Image (tube, helix red, strand yellow):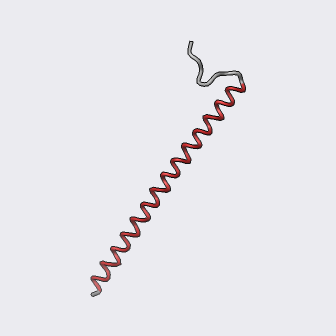
Amino acid sequence: MAIGETASANGETAAANGQTAAANGQTAAANGETAAAIGETAAAIGETAAAQRGLSFPPERA
């Protein structure tokens, strides 16, 4: 009986580890979205700075 209980506990641990891995994946995805938003914000700041200097963005090609 102890072997069956141990196997059951190991299965529950494996399931919990799977849930943790899924949560870690969701966190990584959210971190990626945050990084993308930061990049977009930085680009907008750069465009604003360029506009304040009278430059076009992206630069016009001759």
Classify the position of the C terminus by image quarter: top right
Above or below, 18 against 4 in this view is above
**13 or 48: nearer the viewer:** 48
Describe residue 50's horizontal placement relative to residue 22 as left or right.
right
Q: What residue sits 62% from the left and 39% below the top?
A: 41
Compared to 35, does 10 lie above or below? below
Q: Position of residue 24 (x, y in %)?
A: 46, 59
Rendered image quadrant of residue 57: top right
Q: Residue furthest top?
A: 62
Residue at (55% x, 45% y) in the render? 35
Report the side of 53 relative to 32 (left or right): right
Taking the spot 39% from the left edge, 65% from the top edge, the residue there is 18
Horizontal side of 55 relative to 4 (left or right) equals right
User: Of all residues shown, which one is farthest toward the bottom?
Assistant: 1
Image position of 12 with respect to 18: above or below: below
Q: Position of residue 1 (x, y in %)?
A: 27, 87
Q: Position of residue 51 (x, y in %)?
A: 69, 26
Q: Residue at x 59, y 43 (%)?
A: 38
User: Quadrant of residue 9 in the image?
Assistant: bottom left
